[in-house]
Image (cartoon, helix red, strand yellow):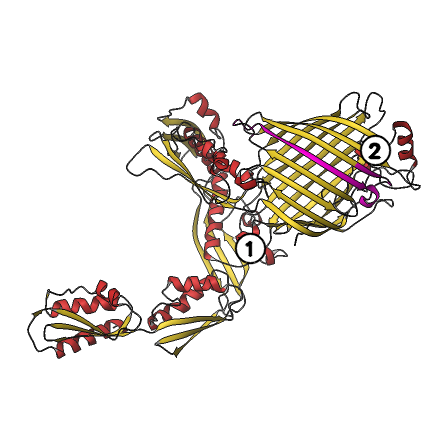
């Protein structure tokens, strides 16, 4: 018999023995022995009320009800005349829970697990709960592959009927997967099949991937991947017949055996759409990803279901149900496949609600909505609205839910929940850049000024390279149609030599206006009109090329430039994108009758491909060309393109690749060709919040700058590892690169970083 049941019967027998009277009507109820539990709580659980006639059965019910609360370890019921007396002995309260020895699992995670089985500070202590602690903690550690864990508990009584609990944990070492055997496979070898698994034996990346640590959940996911692999190859009768997991007596090694039955390959004999199609078959048929004569593929069948569901969702049938109905002919090894469409009811959006935007004004969020209230619900518009919110850069996270409206069958609400990130910076302080050296700055920069979505910047920057004063304003929604507008006024004094360039300096006063027009959801056309007054200063060490330019063109230039740019942006979010891309093509030209006449054409693009949940592959390129026209023979040297550095070809000193002047200083050139590839992945062992602000990457860079046309033999290559951190003090980017084909004249720089900080 369980202890708490035994206590209940002892209390009940004691009560029966104490009573030698007939049933009576309760005039009053008195409680005795309460310390922490409020009398109101007891009366709330007590099923007897004054004025009620009680007998032995009602008393038994009352004792049982109070025991079930878990607050008391002993209860006695008696009477004093017509007064019911309830005497209670409370269980001690848990004053503190201390964990020792846990390193692999955070204390807060273990405390949450203990709370789920009824053990938490402030709760009543029940010794029976201690029996559950070991099994719960073992479960936590087993999920991490630590099967040798040992748990001991110690309960110490303290004052005021309280106890302190000490839980000592000896974690032991994680058991490693020693071997995975697949039995019964004929069509594919073990290496091919195990390549689909997340689990695996110990390798050189196991410290990061943890692939060699066994867990039941991970193995279940691997078996589903194995099943999907076979189903995608036409083996529709594939089965995992059994799975055996064995652990060695020392609990250090695990052996997994998987028995499979492959079956035969099945081909499609017929593919058809049935049911209530709603949308014209001519629109749905192109969405079918597989056809007669092909090997059956569950993946392509699922893609077909999703594509048809999304298309119906755009017509308001967001709860459409598309089922795959196979008719298997085992004799001929063929399948007749039908996609049965049940559109359900057409659904309208009653209300769009946004939560979490404490700083950002509601109108800033709602103007990004592509789904409208009181309109037909459209799956693609709801998702597109989410993507546009993520691309603003104001929010760390955006989630969307579409609950049905209670009492209706054809209405939903669309609820967006956002988590805001700091969108501006107010600082006065010091920073350091590998190129600019020590930087003194004071700035007020706000990308979401007062929550309006407008960008306002006041800058002062003083470094070894330049002194900058700047005021800028940008309104991305000058009109309701998302036509943008703004201005920029600045003064910049630059010492080019300090930036690894030639030996000259410039003072530039600039003022400009800008605007932009959306062409569609993904394309935008922007225009800038800028006036620049440039004062060029030389010295005794200035190169012959610059001195000749000054002799031909003078040292002061008033230039009015007009530029246009087309941008195609399909990224899923603005910060650390994982899919889509951004491509821009720009043309800048000095208008005729300016002191200098030139033009520049440039393409920049970056494309992101999600490989797995944590791995993102990225390709990037930067191609540019410039020249003079009219009275200006060549592109002015201070408008040259440069390569090398953190944002270009890493491993080479900033701005140093390409042509050099007569003093062997980097001179840049009118032709630029830069590209590369990155493989981004999260930092191991960080929680989700930190992962959203920190990522690592493996990269390969290629590029150079040329005097006339690209010479592929002169391209420079590098490879290495990078880290990016959106720190509270500003963005930090670090790279460790190895140049692969550096020449004797190149300036190599293996470690590179750029960091700005405000205090």
Vertical side of 659 occupied by 727: above or below: below
Q: Position of residue 209 (x, y in %)?
A: 58, 54
Frontmost residue, 546 versus 224? 546
Callout 1 secondary element: loop
- Does 490 appear in magenta? yes
Residue 621 as seen in the image, left or right of residue 521:
right
Across and down, in percent, residue 442 comes to: 68, 47
Q: Which residues are magenta?
A: 478-507
Location of the C terminus by quadrant is bottom right
In the displayed structure, would residue 293 be above or below residue 395? above
| Secondary element at image label 2 | helix
- In the rendered image, which residue does mark 1 sit on? 200
Outermost residue toward the left? Answer: 22
| Marks 1/2: CA–CA distance | 57 Å
Rendered position, 189 above or below 512:
below
The label number, if any, that marks residue 637 in the structure image: 2
Where does the N terminus fall, quadrant-wise? Answer: bottom left
Work out whether mark 1 precedes mark 2 in sequence or the reverse, and give the earlier one.
1
Q: Residue at x 38, y 37 (%)?
A: 413
């Amino acid at each position: 018999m369980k202890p708490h049941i035994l206590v209940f019967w002892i209390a009940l027998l004691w009560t029966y023995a104490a009573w030698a009277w007939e049933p009576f009507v309760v005039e009053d109820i008195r409680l005795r022995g309460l310390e922490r539990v409020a009398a109101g709580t007891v009366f709330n659980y007590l099923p007897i009320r004054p004025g009620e006639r009680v007998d032995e059965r009602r008393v038994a019910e009352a004792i049982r009800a109070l025991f079930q609360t878990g607050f008391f370890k002993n209860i006695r019921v008696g009477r004093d005349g017509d007064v019911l007396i309830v005497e209670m002995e409370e269980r001690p309260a848990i004053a503190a829970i201390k964990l020792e020895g846990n390193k692999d699992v955070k204390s807060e995670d273990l405390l949450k697990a203990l709370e789920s089985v009824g053990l938490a500070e402030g709760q009543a202590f029940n010794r029976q709960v201690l029996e559950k602690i070991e099994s719960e903690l073992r479960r936590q550690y087993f999920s991490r592959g630590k099967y040798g864990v040992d748990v001991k508990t110690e309960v110490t009584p303290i004052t005021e009927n309280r106890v302190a609990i000490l839980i000592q944990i000896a974690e032991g070492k994680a058991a490693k997967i020693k071997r995975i055997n697949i039995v019964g496979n004929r069509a594919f070898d073990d290496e091919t099949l195990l390549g689909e698994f997340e689990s695996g034996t110990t390798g050189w990346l196991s410290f990061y991937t943890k692939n060699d640590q066994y867990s039941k959940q991970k193995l279940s996911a691997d078996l589903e991947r194995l099943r999907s692999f076979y189903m995608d190859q036409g083996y529709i009768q594939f089965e995992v017949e059994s799975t055996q997991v064995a652990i060695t007596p020392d609990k250090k090694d695990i052996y997994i055996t998987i028995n499979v039955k492959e079956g035969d390959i099945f081909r499609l004999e017929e593919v058809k759409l049935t049911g209530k199609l709603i949308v014209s078959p001519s629109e749905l048929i192109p969405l079918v990803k597989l056809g007669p004569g092909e090997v059956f593929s569950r993946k392509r069948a699922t893609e077909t279901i999703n594509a048809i569901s999304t298309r119906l969702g755009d017509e308001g049938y967001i709860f459409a149900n598309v089922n795959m109905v196979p008719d298997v002919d085992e004799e001929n090894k063929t399948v007749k496949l039908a996609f049965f469409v049940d559109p359900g009811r057409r659904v309208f959006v009653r209300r769009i609600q946004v939560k979490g935007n404490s700083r950002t004004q509601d109108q800033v969020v709602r103007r990004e909505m592509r789904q409208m209230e009181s309109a037909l619900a459209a799956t693609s518009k709801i998702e597109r609205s989410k993507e546009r919110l993520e691309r603003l850069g104001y929010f760390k996270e955006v989630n969307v839910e579409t609950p049905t409206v209670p009492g209706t069958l054809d209405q939903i609400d669309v609820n967006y929940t956002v988590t805001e990130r700091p969108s501006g910076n107010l600082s006065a302080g010091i920073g350091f850049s590998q190129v600019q050296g020590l930087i003194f700055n004071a700035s007020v920069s706000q990308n979401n000024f007062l929550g309006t979505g407008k960008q306002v910047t006041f800058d002062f920057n003083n470094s070894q390279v330049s002194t900058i004063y700047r005021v800028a304003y940008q309104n991305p929604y000058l009109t309701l149609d998302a036509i943008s507008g703004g201005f920029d006024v600045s003064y910049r004094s630059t010492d080019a030599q300090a930036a690894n360039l030639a030996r000259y300096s410039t003072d530039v006063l600039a003022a400009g206006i800008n605007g932009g027009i959306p062409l569609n959801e993904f394309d935008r056309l922007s225009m800038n009109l800028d006036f620049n007054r440039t004062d060029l200063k030389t010295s005794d060490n200035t190169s012959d090329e610059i001195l000749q330019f000054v002799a031909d063109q003078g040292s002061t230039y008033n230039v009015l430039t007009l530029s246009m740019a087309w941008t195609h942006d399909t990224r899923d979010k603005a910060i650390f994108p994982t899919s889509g891309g951004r491509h821009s093509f720009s043309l800048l030209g000095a208008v005729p009758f300016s002191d200098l006449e030139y033009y520049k054409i440039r393409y920049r693009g970056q494309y992101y491909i999600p490989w797995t949940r944590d791995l993102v592959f990225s390709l990037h390129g930067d191609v540019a060309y410039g020249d003079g026209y009219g009275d200006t023979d060549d592109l002015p040297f201070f408008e040259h393109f440069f390569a090398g550095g953190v944002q270009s070809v890493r491993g080479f000193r900033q701005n140093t690749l390409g042509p050099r002047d007569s003093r062997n200083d980097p001179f840049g050139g009118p032709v630029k060709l830069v590209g590369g590839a990155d493989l981004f992945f999260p930092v191991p062992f960080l929680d989700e919040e930190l992962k959203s602000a920190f990522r690592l990457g493996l990269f390969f860079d290629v590029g150079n700058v040329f005097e006339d046309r690209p010479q592929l033999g002169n391209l420079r290559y590098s490879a290495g590892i990078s880290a990016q951190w959106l720190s509270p003090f500003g963005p930090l980017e670090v790279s460790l690169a190895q140049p692969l084909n550096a020449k004797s004249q190149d300036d190599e720089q293996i470690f590179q970083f750029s960091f700005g900080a405000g205090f």
